[in-house]
Image: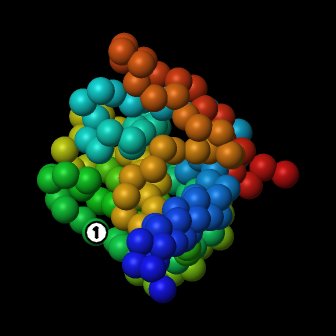
Amino acid sequence: MNRSFVRFATAALGLVLSASAVAAAPKFQMPFPCKQVWHGNTREDHSPKLAVDLSRAKGEGDKVVAAAKGRVSKVRNLGNRSYGKYVVIDHGGGWSTLYAHLNAYSVKVGDRLEQGQALGTVGNTGTSFGAHLHHEQLLNGALQKIKFDGRGIHYYDGRDRYTDYKSANRCP
């Protein structure tokens, strides 16, 4: 068989697999109970760039829930460094979500969670400046643009601003 064709076919197959993995993304919901409104903030200097910080007045201690069903793959406490207390959920198909700066977590590695099930509370741990939830959606370890309920969030557009998002997680 022609080597050029084999390389082309392999590359094309890789693109098809990548596209199908993205298409197979869970329908992530906001990581908060039904109908709660949170301010989402992205910044040019946010690290990592595609993450979102979610906050609201007097939000410290509020319940954080799974954005989609999955298995807890990581529970860590980095103290006053980086993400502080955080949880990672593996949703299958290469997809995972990260929930950071938690005040507390109520899960352990291996726990299976349904969408909307509690995993911890909003906090101000690690290198955080005020109570908020740092949220990431990843595919095979690479950060992806965040979607809640199938819709992309607003990303930094040259000015710092908050966008309000209302949770539809486990709404009847």
Identify whether 78 is placed above or below 33: below
Residue behind mark 1: 76
Q: Residues within 10 Å of mark 1 (few under 14, many from 20)?
A: some
User: 162 and 33: which one is in front?
Assistant: 162
The image position of residue 115, as x and y in percent, is 65, 63
Towards the viewer: 112 or 52: 52
Can residue 117 be seen here? no
Q: Residue furthest right?
A: 172
Horizontally, is 32 left or right of 96 in the view? right
Compared across the picture, whether 149 is left or right of 19 comes to: right
Would residue 79 be seen by someone viewing this image from the given angle? Answer: yes
Q: Residue at x 63, y 50 (%)?
A: 29
On the image, the x and y values in percent for residue 65 come to: 56, 57
* Residue 124: quadrant of the picture: top left
* Relative to 48, residue 57 above or below: above
**Residue extending furthest toward the front:** 2
Q: How is the image coloured?
A: rainbow
Picture residue at 58% right of the left edge, 65% below the top: 16
Residue 167 or residue 118, whichever sits in front: 167
Q: In the image, what residue occupies the spot 58% across and 59% down?
A: 19
Determine whether 22 is above or below 89 in the image.
Answer: above
Q: From the viewer's perspective, is residue 17 above or below residue 57? A: below
Name the residue rendered at 37%, 58% in the picture. 142
State the image coordinates of residue 7 (x, y, percent, origin top left): 42, 72
Q: Secondary structure at mark 1?
A: strand
Q: Amino acid at mark 1?
A: Arg
Q: Residue 56, percent across and down?
A: 48, 30
